[in-house]
Image (cartoon, helix red, strand yellow):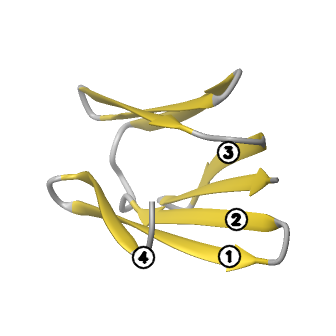
Amino acid sequence: MTGKQQLADDVGLRRYDYGDETVLAADIGPGRDASVDVLDDAVIVVVDDEQYDLDLAGDAQAFIRNGVLTIEVNA
């Protein structure tokens, strides 16, 4: 994944590389029903009634704060 991708039709996913860490960020928006979970090498994001699976390489942690999804991956 490089640059800007789409997580959902109306949600862009941006990638930022910082040395040995990659950060993926998406502005889901406030007030939407959203959750995120990390399982092995995948991140599962649920926004409203849609589920999105992202395959990752490396240790990851993910969270949603103030309507912004952040996924941090250490290589």
Mark 1, residue position: 17
In 3D space, how far apart are the residues under numbered discs 1 and 3 (Cα atoms)? Answer: 16 Å
- Rendered image quadrant of residue 12: bottom left
Q: Position of residue 4 (x, y in %)?
A: 36, 73
- The mark lying in front, picked from 1 and 3, is 1
Where residue 60 appears, as percent x and y from the top left, is 75, 42
Picture coordinates of residue 29 (x, y %)? Answer: 36, 62
Q: Is residue 68 above or below residue 37?
A: below
Q: Which mark is residue 3?
A: 4
Q: Position of residue 73 (x, y in %)?
A: 74, 52
Query: Who is closer to the viewer here, 34 or 4?
Result: 4
The amino acid type of the residue labelled 1 equals Asp
Which label's residue is closer to the chain start, 4 or 3?
A: 4
User: In which quadrant of the rendered view does residue 45 lie?
Assistant: top left
Of helix, strand and loop, which one carries label 1? strand
Q: Residues within 10 Å of mark 4 (few under 14, many from 20)?
A: few
